[in-house]
Image: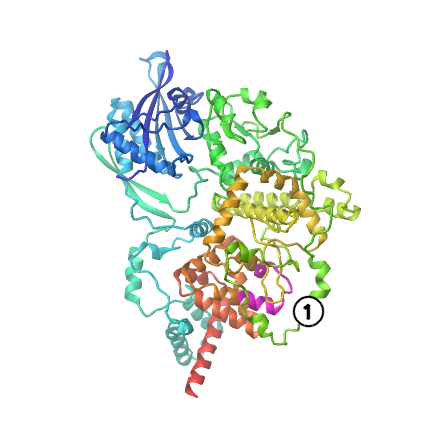
Amino acid sequence: MENNVAYCLLAEFDIDQGSTLSQQYPYPTGTDEHLLADLMIPEGAHDQNEDWTIFFLNQTPANTIAPPLDSEAPTPSSKHRRTYSKMLLQEEHAKPQLLYVLNLVRTKKDDTVPRGALVKALAIVSKQPYIHIYKPILLLALEDYFQSGSPSILSRLYDAINNMSTSTVPPISRSEKMILKASPDRKDLFAEKWSHLFFKRQSDDSDAFQPMFDDDLARNRRSSTNSKANNSLEEEFEEKLKRTSIGITDQSDNGQSQSFFETMPVDTHYYKTSISYMNVDYKRLSLPTRVPLSTFDEEIGDYSIINLIQTFSAHPVPSAPMHPHLHTSGASTHPIILLFNALITQKRVVFLGYGKPASLVTNFVLAACALVSGGGGVLRGFIERAFPYTCLKDLDNFLMIPGYIAGVTNPRFEDNHAWWDVLFNINTGKVTVSTQIEPVTQLRDNVLSSPSAIPTYQSLSSGVSSQHTSLSTPIPSSVIMNQTASSGSASQSIHSTNHTLSSPPSRSKLGMSDSFSSAMSNTSDDASITASQRNDSSNRESSDSIFMNEIMALINEHYGEAHIRARFTDLVTSFVRMASRYEEEASSNGYTSIGFPSQPFSNGQLGSGTVFNDENSRLRELSANAFRIEGWQDTATYKNYRHDFQQYLKKRAIKDIDVAHQIQRLRTAKGMHPSEAHLIYRSLAQNAETYEQVVEIVEQLPPHLDGSLPLGFGLLHPHTSVREATVDFFVKLQTYPLGNLLLSSLNAFYRLALMRQIEQRIGSQAVQQGN
C-alpha cells in the first residue's frame, strides 16, 4: 500500500451544533476539529448543490497534525501513524511537510429533515500536489455515504486510493519537468523512460555520426541516381524532407524500435493508472486515472491563469493610494502586474467572492501562486502562506502569517483594511489597495546615483569594433580553445571573472527584455537621472504594458492555458535575472548570490548574467525594478531562491558556462563576431556529453521561443569554423532521443543544410582514408 492519502475526513452540518467533524480515518488528525469542519463546509454551502474547496494542513499551530505519542501501543493504526509522521518530519526539528486537502461538499434537498436539506462534506488529505486527480472517486464515495451512511465508506476510499500503484512512475528531474511543461503538444517526450530499451549513445564520439547517416545518405544517392528525368525539384525536396522529418535517426535496429514504440504511452506528460473502488453495492469499479508528471509543489489542483487574467483585466487599478512596490508603472499599472508585485514583495492579498462558490476563490488563489512562482519551476514559498479557502473562524490563525494569500466569501473582509494590503473583488473585478498598507519611502541601495562599474555596449562599441577582425580573417587558436576553468567550486569559478564588457539585453519573442521595464514615478526625482533620460523613459511604453498586451492578444487568439503559463514563467525568470544584476551593482564587491555575474564575451571567455544596451537602458530597467527588487529581497521566497540557486551551482551538469545566456545571445544578438559564435557552439558541443547536459541545453529552447531555431543559425553561418562547430553540436545532440526530438522541430531548410554538411564531412573522411 502506498501513501497517496494520509487521512479521510467527513463533516456534516447539524442545525443545533453547526458544522461538525463526524469521522476521521484511519485516526484523528490532532488538529482543531471545529476549524476543520468549518473549512469543509464553507459559508453559503447551502446555496450550492455542490462545491469543491482546497485548504492546507501543517501551516499554523491550529491546523498542524499532532505527532504520535511514544507510549502508544503498537497497534496497526499507530504503526501507520508513526510511519507517516516519520515521513513528514525530515529531521527532528524540521517544519512538517505541507499537506493538501481536497474537499467535496454537497447539499441534497430533503423535506423530512430540519431546514429541508442535508449538507455533508468528504475530504482527503494528501502530500501530493496533483490532488485534483481524485475528484472522480470522491464523487462516488460521497454519493455512497448519502445512500448508506456507513462509516466503512471512508475506509474503502482510503484503501482504494492508497492501492493505486505509482511504483513504476519514471523519475523526472526539474529540467525534464520544465521541458514537459513547455511542450504540451509533444506527446513523446522522454518516451525512452517508459521502456527497458534505453537509447544509448555511441561510445566513440569521433565516429558517432557515421552509422547514423550512412544508410540515409546511401538512400539519398540511390534516389538521385535512379530518379526519373522528369522529377521536379519540388519532388526531390519533398523526398529529402520526409527523410529528415523526424530528425536524424539510426535505422539499423528496426526490431528494437518497434518494440519500444509498442511500450510507449499515448502521452508521456502523464502516468496512466487506475483506482479500484468498491461501492456501496459491493461492485468493484475501475476508475482510469492520469498522474501528471510535470507538476511542481507550487502547483496545486486544476487552476486557470487565463480565468484569473480575464476577471481582473477589465478595470484599471485605482491611482490612490500609490505604493512603489505595487505601482511600478504608476497609475497605468496593469491589475495582473500589480498582483505579481504584491505577491513577490510579500504583501497580504485577499480574493473576495461574496455569494460565489468557494471553488472559485480557491482557484484564484492557486492560480495566483502558480503565476508568481513561474509554475513552481522558478520560485517557491507562496503555497506555504496560501489559504485557498478560509473563513472568519480562521482569521486569528492566518493573520499571523506574513504575506498571506487568502480566498474568502465573507463580505466583512472588504470593509476592514487592516486585514489585508490588496483586495481583489471577484464579483466586480476591481482591485483595492489598503489605506493602511505599510509605506515605503526610499531605496536602501540606490544604484542609479552613479554610473555602473560594468561598461555598457554603447560606451565600448568603438573598442569592440577595433578588436574584431573581418569574417575572412582566421580565428586565433587562443580564441577557439575552450578556456573555461573547471577546477574549484562552482561558486568560485562563476564569480572569479572580471566585469570588462557588457553584452546586449536578452529580449524574448514578446519584445520584452530580461527584466520588467516600467517608468516608476518615484525614481524620476533622482538627481543623477538627466532630463533627457527621464523623457526617454516616459515616452517608452513599459515592458509591463507590452507584456500584458501580448498576453491579452494571445488569449483573444485562443492560445491555451499551457502557453500562457509558459509566458509567465519567462516573466518570473526575467525578473529574477534582473534582481541578480541589481544585487550585483548594489554590492560593494560586485557579488550576487542569486545569479551569474554580468559579463560579455571577451578574450575567449564567454559572457554570462544580465546586461544592457546602453546607460539609458540600464537606468530605465533598474529604476523600474528597484523598489520591487528590494521588496523581494526581504521575503522568504528570496531566501528560498538563493538557497536553490546555490544548490543548482553544485549539482548542475554544465558547470563551465551560463547556458541561458549563450542561447539568448544566439537568439537575439545582432552583429555577433564569428569568434564568439564559434566559441558558443564549440562550448555547447563540449557540454553535450551526457544525458543530463543535453537536458539542461534543451530546457533553454522552449517551443514558444522558437525552439531549436537559434541553434540552426550556425548551419548557415558564413564562417566555416562556426558551421563546423554547429555540426559537431548537432551530431552529439542527436545521439540522445531528446536531441532527436529537438532536431525534428528544426526548420526543414536547416535540416537539409545539416545533412548536406555531414555528407560533405563523410566524403572528406573517405578521401582521406583512401589516401
Residue 678 lies in the magenta stretch: yes
| Residue segment shown in magenta | 665-681
Which residue is identified by label 1?
467
Observer-nearest residue: 346 or 486?
486
Q: Is residue 692 left or right of residue 640?
A: left
Is 245 situated above or below 358? below
**Residue placed most toward the observer, 407 or 654:** 654
Kind of element beneath mark 1: helix
From the image, give the main secondary structure of the stretch colored magenta.
helix
**Percent x, y for residue 69?**
31, 27
Q: Is residue 365 left or right of residue 264?
A: right
Q: Residue furthest right?
A: 531
User: Which amino acid, by three-letter code, is at mark 1?
Assistant: Gln
Q: Is residue 327 visible?
A: yes
Please, which residue is most extreme toward the left here? Answer: 282
Where does the image place residue 576, in percent across and percent down from the top left? 57, 46
Query: Nearest the camera: 30 or 710?
Result: 30
Residue 373 seen in render:
no
Residue 697 drawn above or below residue 401 = below
Quadrant of res 460: bottom right
**Is residue 644 magenta-colored?**
no
The percent position of residue 618, horizontal first and vertical second, equals 68, 50
- The local crowd at label 1, few if under 14, some if 14 to 19, many if 20 or more residues have their Cα within 10 Å, is few
Outermost residue on the bottom side: it is: 771
In the displayed structure, would residue 755 be above or below residue 520?
A: below
